Amino acid sequence: MITPAMHTFRFDQLLGAVPVLWLFTLLLAPLAQAQPVEVRYATILPRGIGQDFVLVKLEQDWRQATAGTIILRRSPGGQKEGEAGIVRKLRSGNYQAALLSVIGLSEIEPDVAVLQKMPLVFQNWAEVDFVREKIRGRLEERLLAQGFVVLFWADSGWVNFFSTREAETPAEYRKMRLFVWAGDEPQIKVMKSLGYQPIALETDYVFSSLASGMIDAAPLAPTFAMGVQIPTVATHVLDLNWTPIVGAAIIRKDVWEKIPSDLRARLQPLCEAAGAAARAEGRRFHEDAMNTLRKGPKTCVHTLTPAQRVEWQELASALGPQVRGELVPAAIYDEVQQLLREYRACKLAAR
């Protein structure tokens, strides 16, 4: 039999439990309602190459490290927009992150240009690594001041010249219409002053422009060129490392700071590992690509004679004064030249 006292006891218990249940429900509500944060990034990097696989792995690593609460996802529009377009959308918030070369990064912070826009200055990857590590802290601070956090630094091989007909000397390239990145007005100005014929395009139009005859040659990384089938329309390749392709993955500062600090601490090492993998993959792919191009049978890689190399060095000497202060801010241009002199002197002394 249930007595009135029993009714009272059970009713009191229920009343006592209500605040506890209510508090428990409030604590669980944010977890139940929380939606994954999506970080959309863009890049002109072709799909299906080694560095793209590095990015795919990074997406998976972010998802796993954050239990699916932070999702890194590539936007499909990067190649058609070009790096100038990607930077505009980064600033507007349409993209939250990007993997950019120096071409795009220097629109945000001009000093970054020193890592790429100095033709025939860097002789090997050891020099690129040495200079980058010496100045990266300052570059990252300046990018941060513009509202962007550097997740990692990357590179993608050297630039070589691809052309629809044979060319081995600077004079022969002056007779050709040459691709330059759209929006890079200082480079166009410098090229014209030296007698070249620059045609500004987004990278997505390089293949069709070579195929149609709108341009005759393009300075490109073989990794990129092979990814978009450039050698099928520009079968001549110059075996000359014109300049390294250097870049970085960046994320908007406001987006990065919305990620809880404990999760950022998990993501940063993953980004550094992705950067190291991207650099290694880019350099390996460059060598593999050049070896593939040398084997042909439809491509012809032109090896320079000592006399032809002298002609290119003379061009580099002529470019120096125009690059300094025009393509690369003068102060950091001078600093990097000094760093390279010191580095080479140490290497020579160690022999």
Image: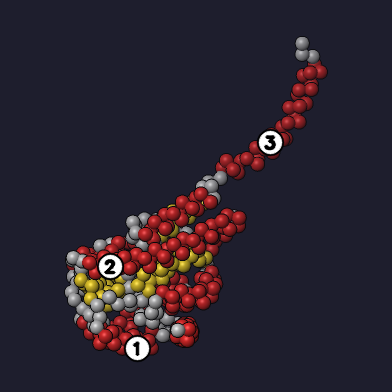
Return the disc, 1 or 2, that comes first in the chain's sequence: 2
- The amino acid beneath tag 2 is Asn
Residue 219 x/y as whole percent: 29, 73
Residue 210 visible? The answer is no
User: Residue sitting at 48 percent across and 76 percent down?
Assistant: 130
Indicate the secondary structure of the residue bearing disc 3: helix
User: Residue sitting at 52 percent across and 65 percent down?
Assistant: 149
Q: CA distance from mark 2 to mark 3?
A: 68 Å
Indicate the secondary structure of the residue bearing disc 2: helix
Task: Say whether marks 2 and 3 touch (CB < 8 Å).
Answer: no
- The amino acid beneath tag 3 is Trp
Task: Say whether marks 1 and 2 touch (CB < 8 Å).
Answer: no
Q: Which residue is mark 1?
A: 317
Q: CA distance from mark 1 to mark 3?
A: 76 Å
Q: CA distance from mark 1 to mark 2?
A: 29 Å
Using residue 235 as the reference point, say whether residue 16 is left or right of it: right
Indicate the secondary structure of the residue bearing disc 1: helix
Residue 137 x/y as whole percent: 54, 73
Return the disc, 1 or 3, that comes first in the chain's sequence: 3
